[in-house]
Image: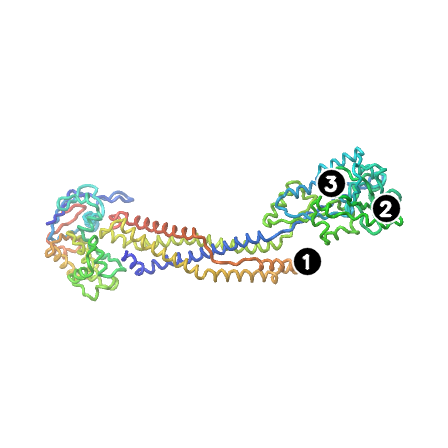
């Protein structure tokens, strides 16, 4: 053993190379593992702390088609899904945590007011001209129900006997008696027919009707039942007639938000003022959208946005009718930085492992072959193959182990500093991304938006806890030790292979 | 007194172009206390015979006995370590070891051999003490060969096999090496078998054998 240790010092040209290869590869491997693990950890943190907002937009649904008689017909281009079904799909997706509905103010689908089954009941009740058993006023604020274009069709559509129905028209300039739609819509429709009605929230338009609440809606108002004085609910419906001096009507039409929200889960529907503003769109083409116009969804699984969208599309939200976009630019930007760094470290890691193994194997083979003559001399002096091979394996094993220990120590001592430098450099690169917007992007009309987007993404990246730190799991050290053992065995095999050769052939 | 005897020794080299019959039934007796010279032209089988005597390989036919015991029944490495000392034309010293360490390496199984003993052997070979700690590359050819002889003696082997030990040396140094070998045989009672091309050196031997076409004449 003493002689072997002496040999290590006496043969620097053989062992220094092996030492350097193992040392450098060890340091590289450990650093790359640390960087990669830090990136994975940061990704996990990012995934846990990031909420991505997605937006489902309904593409054009209704269109006006000119009929043979010179009138117009409104055609529903999307027969595939009712809005209620869309909501069911979204609610069934467990990864979506919040849903914000943004509806067209002209038309609000009745199926949104209740479940599919209840809606079917509603239709059936309406078809049968069912009566209402509870003398409760229904009033909904800023929503609509199934309706019709003319007042005379309203009882049938709502399933309310005509004598139970009181319609009060609010302020506005009318087109003609009995027409519930505003002039613009009515002309577009061309002829009176049963139709979805909503309310038309514009100055001077609106009316109120009072009717007993149908049974199918009572379930939604369970909480109201026990109360001594159920609130009066009102429905403002589109219309154009002035109701004279009835200024009190408007006050009656205020719905109880609490119940509305409890029924439809639209927690933020009325509470978000900005959302509410989107409902009031006097310039909107009422035929372009109906019912649900947009749905804002949030998910706490930013990495699964594509999967969520894909799942919804597969479930029936066809791309022809719905557009789903995700505002996950920041997330993707931050993720890309970390993935880029993680992948780079992984590539370096793989290269260090591959080249390290290859170089070590080659150098060991070279070093053993270089000492071939020594092996033959030892054999000639009567040393056994096993003994010679064991001594060589010990020498190489000691050097490899020494290099490993030095590599681990160096990585441990300087790892955090190097990781910090890498982290710093990565952040500087991220910052420079804003300055280095491509000329094409700079010249684009929305380059300001791009810049803002990028700036906020960079801020988000800098806020993300990407503190690269040295940290290697213990099994890695075990693997390194195992590798050292394998290479010692390899050196043993090489030496023994040479020692085993026919000495006569060699001498000859 | 040790007696190395070869009986009907045959050995073939199988090569790409065919089989070369290197030894074709060699018979001979080598006794301790004598210097034997093996001469012959290149390819006559001298070195092959020496290698077989050293136990590097087994003969294809025939046998080698040492004091009546077939050496094939002994573990080759043990045989070489305890019974045979080798001296080569190219000295074959380990380049990164000093002269003393090279000698100690030759002690083989004799773990108790001390550096002082190795130095004594080197001294007996006429090597100056100043050279004891030098590496082979810092020694002359004659000095290296003396170290090689000292290494062969370090194990107290009874048989010394020398393959062209003077081949790389000038005539004066060569003569000195031969004198040492003679001394090993006569004074220390070793059986020294010397392979050489030189008739002059062969003439110094107690017994001369000539190898011709694989046969000992």
Q: Nearer the viewer, residue A61 or A227?
A: A227
Q: Furthest-bottom residue in view?
A: B130
Mark 3 and mark 1 in contact (Cβ < 8 Å)?
no
Q: Residue furthest top?
A: A128
Instruction: Kindly indicate whether the residues beneath marks 2 and 1 are on one polypeptide chain.
Output: yes
Camera-side mark, 2 or 3 = 2
Q: Give residue A507's mark.
A: none
In this rendering, the label closer to the viewer, 2 or 1: 2
| Residue A283 image offset from top left, x and y in percent | 79, 51
* Mark seen at residue A169: 2
What secondary structure is found at the residue carrying circle 2? strand
Residue at disc 1, secondary structure: loop
Secondary element at image label 3: helix
Measured as percent of width and height from the top left, residue A269 is found at 71, 49
Furthest residue toward front: A228
Q: Nearer the viewer, residue A207 or A464?
A: A207
Query: Are both tags, 1 and 3, on one chain?
Result: yes
Query: Which residue is rendered at x = 20% and y = 60% of the image?
Result: B115
Residue B45 seen in this snapshot = no
- The chain containing the residue under callout 2 comes to A
Per the model, the C-alpha gap separating discs 2 and 3 is 25 Å
Q: Is residue A31 among what the camera can see?
A: yes
Q: Residue A337 at x, y = what percent?
A: 56, 56
Gap in Å between the C-alphas at discs 2 and 1?
A: 46 Å
Q: Which residue is mark 1?
A: A446
Give left or right: position of A210 versus B95: right
Side of A300 relative to B24 (left or right): right
| Label 1 crowd (10 A; few <14 / some 14-19 / many >=20) | few
Rendered-image quadrant of the N terminus of chain A: bottom left
Return the residue at label 3. Answer: A111
- In-image side of A216 versus A405 (left or right): right
Subunit that carries the residue with mark 3: A
């Amino acid at each position: 053993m003493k002689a072997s240790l002496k040999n290590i010092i006496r043969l620097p040209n053989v062992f220094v190379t092996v030492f350097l290869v193992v040392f450098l590869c060890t340091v590289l491997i450990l650093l790359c593992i640390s960087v990669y693990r830090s990136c994975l950890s940061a990704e996990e943190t990012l995934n846990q702390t990031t909420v991505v907002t997605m937006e489902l937009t309904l593409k054009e649904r209704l269109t006006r088609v000119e009929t043979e008689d010179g009138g117009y017909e409104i055609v529903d281009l999307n027969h595939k899904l009712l809005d209620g079904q869309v909501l069911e799909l979204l609610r069934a997706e467990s990864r979506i945590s919040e849903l914000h509905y943004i509806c067209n103010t002209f038309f609000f689908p009745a199926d949104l007011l209740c479940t599919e089954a209840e809606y079917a009941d509603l239709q059936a009740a309406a078809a049968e001209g069912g009566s209402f058993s509870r003398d409760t006023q229904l009033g909904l604020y800023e929503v609509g129900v199934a309706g019709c274009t003319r007042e005379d069709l309203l009882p049938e559509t709502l399933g309310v006997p005509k004598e139970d129905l009181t319609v009060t028209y609010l302020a506005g300039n009318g087109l003609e008696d009995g027409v519930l739609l505003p002039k613009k819509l009515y002309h577009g429709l061309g002829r009176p027919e049963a139709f979805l009605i909503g309310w038309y929230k514009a100055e001077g338009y609106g009316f109120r009707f009072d009717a007993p609440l149908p049974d199918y809606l009572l379930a939604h108002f369970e909480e109201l039942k026990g109360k001594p004085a159920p609130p009066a609910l009102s429905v403002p419906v589109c219309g154009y007639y002035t109701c004279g001096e009835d200024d009190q009507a408007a006050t009656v039409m205020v719905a109880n938000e609490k119940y509305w929200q409890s029924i439809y889960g639209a927690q933020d529907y009325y509470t978000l003022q900005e959302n509410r503003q989107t409902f009031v769109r006097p310039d909107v083409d009422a035929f372009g959208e109906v019912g649900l116009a947009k749905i804002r969804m949030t998910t706490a699984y930013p990495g699964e946005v594509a999967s969520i969208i894909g799942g919804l599309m597969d479930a029936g939200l066809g791309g022809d009718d719905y557009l789903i976009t995700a505002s996950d630019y920041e997330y993707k930007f931050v993720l890309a930085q970390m993935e880029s760094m993680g992948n780079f470290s992984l590539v370096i890691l793989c290269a260090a492992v591959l080249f390290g193994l290859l170089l070590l194997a080659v150098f060991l083979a070279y070093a053993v072959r270089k000492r071939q003559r020594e092996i033959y001399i030892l054999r000639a002096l009567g040393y056994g193959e096993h003994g010679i091979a064991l001594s060589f394996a010990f020498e190489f094993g000691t050097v490899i182990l020494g290099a490993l220990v030095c590599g681990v120590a160096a990585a441990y001592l300087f790892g955090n500093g190097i990781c910090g430098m890498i982290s710093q450099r990565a952040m500087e690169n991220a910052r420079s991304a804003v300055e280095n917007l491509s000329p094409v992007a700079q010249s684009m009309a929305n380059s300001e938006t791009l810049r803002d987007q990028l700036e906020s993404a960079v801020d988000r990246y800098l806020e993300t806890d990407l503190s690269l730190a040295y940290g290697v799991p213990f099994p890695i050290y075990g693997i390194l030790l195992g590798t050292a053992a394998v290479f010692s065995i390899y050196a043993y095999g090489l030496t023994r292979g040479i020692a085993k050769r026919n000495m006569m052939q060699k001498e000859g | 007194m040790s007696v190395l005897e070869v009986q009907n020794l045959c050995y073939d080299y199988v090569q790409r172009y065919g089989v070369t019959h290197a030894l074709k039934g060699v018979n001979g007796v080598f006794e301790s206390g004598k210097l034997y010279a093996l001469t012959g032209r290149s390819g006559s089988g001298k070195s092959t015979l020496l290698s077989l005597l050293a136990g590097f390989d087994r003969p294809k036919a025939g046998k080698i006995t040492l004091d009546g015991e077939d050496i094939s029944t002994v573990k080759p490495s043990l045989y070489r370590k305890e019974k045979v000392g080798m001296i080569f034309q190219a000295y074959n010293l380990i380049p990164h070891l000093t002269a003393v360490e090279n000698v100690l390496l030759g002690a083989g199984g004799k773990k108790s051999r001390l550096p002082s003993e190795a130095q004594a052997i080197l001294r007996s070979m006429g090597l100056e003490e100043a050279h004891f700690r030098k590496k082979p590359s810092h020694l002359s050819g004659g000095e290296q060969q003396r170290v090689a002889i000292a290494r062969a003696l370090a194990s107290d082997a009874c048989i010394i096999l020398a393959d062209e030990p003077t081949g790389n040396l000038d005539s004066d140094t060569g003569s000195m090496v031969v004198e040492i070998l003679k001394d090993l045989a006569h004074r220390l009672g070793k059986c020294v078998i010397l392979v050489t091309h030189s008739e002059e050196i062969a003439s110094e031997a107690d017994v001369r054998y000539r190898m011709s076409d694989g046969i000992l004449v």
